[in-house]
Image (spheres, grey):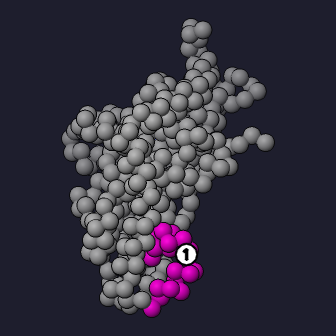
């Protein structure tokens, strides 16, 4: 039986944090065994808001290195940089021409990000979800593992593919022009919350560094951030108490990183005070990140291997992307290419 295909990506917009790992990348690692997997660094998405070119270029390589350090195996998965495959921008244009403007105007992430940009909102920021749809649809992806916040973008990709391409331009009869992807949202860790406010998502863009644990944070800094994390007045850690979002969040992180799971970590921590729990969580977090940081350091020191991996990923991706683009060209009547 043919393996289902998975595609996902993260923007190289800053140091990846625990939320990116537990909500996204960690799930990719398991999927490699059972699926055909493509993982890209979506640098074209990163320029939809003002950016520094030198920083972007370094972050792009560093994000790719972190994928590998987190366990994405380049022998099994194709790892590539989005901007190196021109088909992403090309398909994005084709999809732009069939996507209603009001579908984009109601995207939650656009509305949130647009507010932050004041009167300097780029067309690219509005178009961000269409580029994401292009990323996904180019690879005939069956499944797209993402965090909860990306669900609306996934729905949009499905709607564009189904309602605006397949049902209008399905002239190939035997197969639809585009495959309809499904989101894959793994509940556990799907949303890691901020260390300073258990009701807010841990995010790269939070101005308070103490709100997140970077995957490359040194051990002392991790310990310090956890020590300062927001707590409440109760003794004993517990899951799912709506009045105790911080307890739920930190215990979730603990249960995943320790490998104990929900039940065992509840048993272990239900009577524990914050003063005892925090050092425990600190140790578990430092140990979980240690191998990732070591592998990352190796990859970034000697970059030849990393560049080779990205070259191979590019060539795998190019092959699939070109085939899809050709189908869409033909469906839309752009036939002078042959
Ligand atoms: P971003 O950092 O917004 O570029 O997100 C990259 C990936 O990580 C996406 O799949 C997000 O859904 C996921 N992600 C980002 N922040 C979190 C978080 N706090 N908890 C869980 N997943 C997250
Ligand atoms: N928008 C996604 C995020 O912020 C990143 C992304 C871009 C993506 N293209 C994608 C994720 C394709 C999955 C598939 O996390």
At 59% from the left and 25% from the top, the residue drawn is 319
Decide if residue 219 is on the left or right side of residue 310. Answer: left
Q: Where is residue 29 shown, x and y percent of the image?
A: 56, 52
Quadrant where the image shows the N terminus = top right
The residue drawn where x is 56% and y is 60% is: 186
Let me know if residue 291 appears in the view.
yes
The magenta region covers: 251-271
Observer-nearest of 286 and 126: 286
Which quarter of the image is occupied by the C terminus?
Answer: top right
In the picture, residue 212 is in which quadrant?
bottom left
Q: Residue at x 45, y 91 (%)?
A: 271
Asked if residue 164 shows in the view, the reply is no
Q: Is mark 1 within 8 Å of ligand 1?
A: no
- Would residue 259 be found to the left or right of residue 277 on screen? right
Secondary-structure class at tag 1: loop
* Residue of label 1: 260
The residue under the point 65% across, 50% down is 33
Q: Quadrant of residue 89?
A: top left
The stretch drawn in magenta includes residue 253: yes
112 left or right of 138 in image: left
């Amino acid at each position: 039986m043919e393996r289902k295909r998975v595609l996902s990506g993260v923007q190289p917009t800053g140091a990846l944090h625990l939320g990116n790992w537990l909500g996204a990348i960690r799930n990719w690692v398991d999927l490699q065994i059972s699926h055909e997997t493509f993982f890209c660094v979506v640098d074209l998405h990163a320029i939809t808001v003002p950016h520094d070119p030198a920083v972007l270029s370094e972050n792009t390589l560093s994000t790719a290195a972190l994928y590998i350090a987190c366990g994405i195996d380049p022998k099994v998965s194709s790892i590539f940089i989005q901007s190196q495959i021109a088909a992403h921008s090309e398909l994005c244009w084709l999809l732009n021409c069939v996507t209603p403007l009001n579908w984009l105007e109601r995207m939650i992430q656009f509305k949130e990000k647009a507010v932050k940009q004041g009167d300097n909102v780029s067309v690219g920021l509005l178009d961000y979800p269409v580029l994401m749809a292009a990323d996904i649809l180019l690879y005939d992806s069956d499944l797209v593992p993402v965090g909860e916040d990306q669900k609306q973008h996934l729905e949009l990709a499905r709607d564009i593919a189904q309602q605006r391409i397949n049902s209008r331009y399905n002239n190939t009869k035997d197969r639809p022009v585009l495959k309809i992807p499904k989101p894959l949202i793994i509940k556990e860790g799907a949303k890691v919350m901020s260390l300073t406010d258990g009701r807010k998502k841990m995010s790269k863009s939070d101005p308070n560094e103490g709100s997140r644990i970077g995957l490359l944070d040194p051990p002392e800094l991790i310990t310090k951030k956890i020590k300062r994390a927001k707590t409440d007045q109760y003794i004993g850690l517990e899951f799912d108490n709506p009045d105790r979002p911080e307890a739920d969040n930190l215990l979730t992180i603990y249960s995943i990183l320790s490998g104990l799971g929900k039940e065992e970590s509840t048993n272990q921590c239900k009577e524990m005070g914050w003063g005892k729990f925090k050092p425990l969580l600190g140790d578990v977090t430092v140990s979980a990140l240690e191998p990732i940081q070591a592998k990352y350091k190796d990859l970034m020191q000697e970059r030849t291997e990393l560049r080779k991996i990205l070259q191979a990923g590019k060539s795998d991706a190019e092959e699939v992307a070109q085939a899809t683009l050709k189908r869409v060209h033909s469906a839309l009547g752009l036939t002078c290419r042959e």
